[in-house]
Amino acid sequence: MIKWALIVLLSLVAISALAIAIGWLLPVAHVAKRHAEVPAPPDRVWATITDIDAFPAWRPDVTRVERVAGDRVSWVEHGRNGRLTFVVERSDPPRTLVTRIADPDLPFGGTWTYEVAPVPRGSAVTITEHGEIYNPLFRFMSRFVFGYDSTMKEYLAALVATGERGTGN
């Protein structure tokens, strides 16, 4: 019995070491892009994605938001992904919004560029992530298990749902 437990333990250690080694070989920076059509006009989509205080009402991954005082629009999201601080880098309503993770202590960082364009049935929303993942194990997991675009998929699904319900701003 001890022999099998030792084999299992050594196998788990070997798999973890292999994942970390592969993670070291992967680039720190990546670019991922997702697109969705939202059944709402661009001005309403823009109002929804920029109404920071309303995020918990439509985003399942956010339980509460705190605004950060300062010269720039900045906030802290609390939720399933922990505590994340964001800042708006650029805003060109209702077309382009660029946000950046503003916490240097996280094992990842980067920007999301939101592009909103009118289409016959509402708005085309494209999110481009310019991300960096500093931890090699997390880099491996993001690339091969979760996918670089998993958070964007969830965000866009929630945004589409607000358009379908006619909710949001």
Image: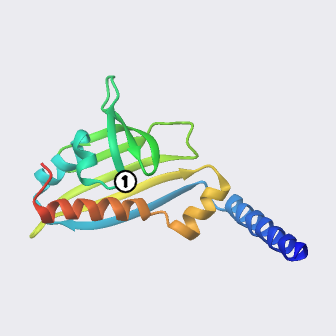
Residue located at (70% from left, 65% from top) = 19
Residue 44, compared with residue 160, is above or below; it is: above
Residue 107 is left or right of residue 2, and the answer is left
Within the image, what quadrant is residue 88 found in? Answer: top left
Q: Residue 84, located in which quarter of the rendered image?
A: top left
Q: Residue at coordinates 84% horizontally, 69% vertically from top-left?
A: 10
Instruction: Mark 1: give few (<14), some (14-19) or many (20+) Cα within 10 Å.
Output: some
**Residue closer to the observer: 139 or 33:** 139
Taking the spot 87% from the left edge, 76% from the top edge, the residue there is: 1
* Residue at image coords 46%, 50%: 81
The foreground one among 166 and 63 is 63
Q: Determine whether 143 is above or below 63 in the image.
A: below
Task: Give the residue number, with chain letter if any, for mark 1.
Answer: 61
User: Under tag 1, what secondary structure?
Assistant: loop
**Residue 50 in the figure: left or right of residue 120:** right
Most extreme residue toward the front is: 1
Q: Which residue is nearer to you in this view: 120 or 75?
A: 75
**What amino acid is labelled 1 in the image?**
Asp
Q: For this view, does 8 lie left or right of residue 151? A: right
Colour mapping: rainbow
Q: Residue 128: x and y, percent?
A: 37, 57
